[in-house]
Amino acid sequence: MSQTPSAWSPSSWREKPIAQDVTYGDKAHLDRVLSKLRRLPPLVSPTEIDRLRSQLADVAAGKAFLLQGGDCAELFDDCSSGPLEHKLSLVLLMSLIIIHGSRLPVVRIMRIAGQYAKPRSKPTEMVDMPGPNGVEKKEILSFRGDNVNGYDPTDRQPDPDRLLGAYFHSTATLNYIRTLLLSGFADLHKPLDWSFSHVRSPEIQQAFGAVIDSLKDSLDFMRVATGGAGGNERGGMETVDIYTSHEALLLEYEEALTRRQGPSVTRSGQSTPSASPIRSRPDPNLQAHGDKYYNVSSHFVWIGDRTRQLDGAHVEYFRGIANPIGIKVGPTMEPAELVRVLDVVNPDRIAGKVTIIGRYGAGKVDQYLPAHIDAVKATDHVVVWQCDAMHGNTKSSITDPSLKTRHFADIIQEIVRSIEIHREKGTILGGVHLELTGEVNEDGFSVTECIGGSMELEDKDLSFNYRTHCDPRLNYEQSLDVAFLLADHLKSRRRGETPKDILLSGLRGRK
């Protein structure tokens, strides 16, 4: 049951019970910070946000594919040129592989420029701390992300100034991404140096090499056919669209960056012309319409699996913003409850408005996804179906139980089964949501946080370059493994063929 627009305001969430809240000791300090945030300029524009929503409508219709990826939790210290270039480069390479296989535009949303907060299953944790009698176990507040508190055990008190830190680090991140794209970072005419020395299986190495040879031939053809010119459409050859996203967990921050926009403009009855956040151009075909509220901290925000209560503060906040939004959905979500949430956050049934992000786990996707699909199909909601194959597949390392890991075999199993279930149901898996990084250490080695993949990382390898302060991420090579697998499945769907067994069986890796 939806409420009237007049019943909503950017602060109406304060009248609802809130999950995963942060308690600040100095309320006056928090109010001063929020007052400052309300006066600061937007990080993204309503025009960019509307453009993304139009592109997501294409994803819902099967006319594009959604690739969303990035860090589990960004760190302020990673806001520097090297890490940002690695993340952007990885997403661009993955999307290039997927485009080649699917022949579809790829909508690229990064978990970046705002993903500084994390929900936790417990508000406190036990850690080893020095005491008068040596090292002692001490209960401290959990690390909630750099915009709340510090990772160091001595820096766990929530600090309102970290919200300002999140804003300015997000600003710097966005500025550098825009600068890279304007400088030709995404130009597909640049030489591509592909190395598959990490791939243990000769069969998989041959399969990957065949894809790259074909892709290079296609790029050579386009170079000749276009005379080196890239064109201006989404997925063009000189620049691309990159959008930002984060979990809108800290509602005080999100409210402070929620702005009224009116009248705004969108193309009536069809997608808006594509342009990246750095290429906004006037369009005479756009039509004006009424006032809207936009969260201008990010293009896309999502509700977590722990904060999607129907009567809760987060659902209340999300129902009033014009941004495209995501809803994390897991085994605890009843099908009828999912429909009720959709009715609340998207009463006007706007295509591209809502992305359902399934995070079931490889062993539970068959049990829960079909009922969720059936429930939504019985309504007139048009949604994007996305698979988060990370969060339901977290395990403890056997070698070091203090380390969390994920098995690559589980990740691809959930992705593949999601594709197959949607095909059986007559719906489309429109995209994937991945925690990944292109980060390397000083010697150029990728992180070792997930087990398996074509490089066949084993449990004993995890401590070699384990860097995450939160959840384990796919590394550079494993992320490209996923891209090749997706490209193969999407190409097979396009041709009406069966995907190659060699990729699926070979990429299951070792557990």
Image: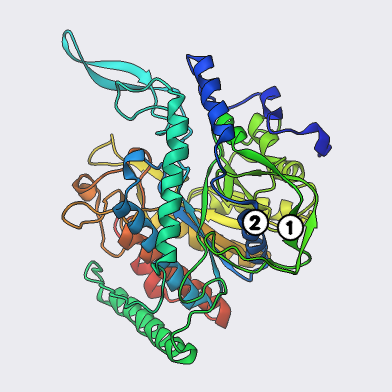
Colour mode of the rendering:
rainbow
Closest to the observer, 78 or 174: 174
Count of marks overlaid on the render: 2
The disc at residue 47 is: 2
Q: Quadrant of the N terminus?
A: top right
The disc at residue 220 is: none
Task: Say which element carries label 2.
Answer: helix
Up the image or down, 124 lies above or below 418; here it is above
Residue 145 in the figure: left or right of residue 59: left
- Residue sitting at 52 percent across and 61 percent down? 278
Q: Position of residue 421 (x, y in %)?
A: 59, 62
Amino acid type, mark 2 = Thr
Q: Position of residue 464 (x, y in %)?
A: 19, 48
- Residue sitting at 53 percent across and 46 percent down? 43
Q: Position of residue 272 (x, y in %)?
A: 68, 66
Amino acid type, mark 1 = Val
Tell me where residue 177 sits by quadrant: bottom left
As measured in the structure, the alpha-carbon distance from the residue carrying label 2 to the one carrying label 1 is 7 Å
Closest to the observer, 194 or 155: 155
- Residue sitting at 57 percent across and 44 percent down? 42
How dense is the environment of label 1, judged by Cα within 10 Å: few (below 14), some, or many (20 and up)? Answer: some
Residue 370 in the figure: left or right of residue 178: right
- Residue sitting at 80 percent across and 54 percent down? 289
How dense is the environment of label 2, judged by Cα within 10 Å: few (below 14), some, or many (20 and up)? Answer: some
Q: Position of residue 36 (x, y in %)?
A: 54, 29
**In contact (CB < 8 Å): disc 2 and disc 1:** yes
Closest to the observer, 294 or 146: 294
Task: Say which element carries label 1.
Answer: strand
Whether residue 397 is visible to the viewer of this picture, yes or no, is yes
Give the residue at mark 1.
265
Closest to the observer, 1 or 270: 270
- Specify which label sits upstream in the sequence, 2 or 1: 2
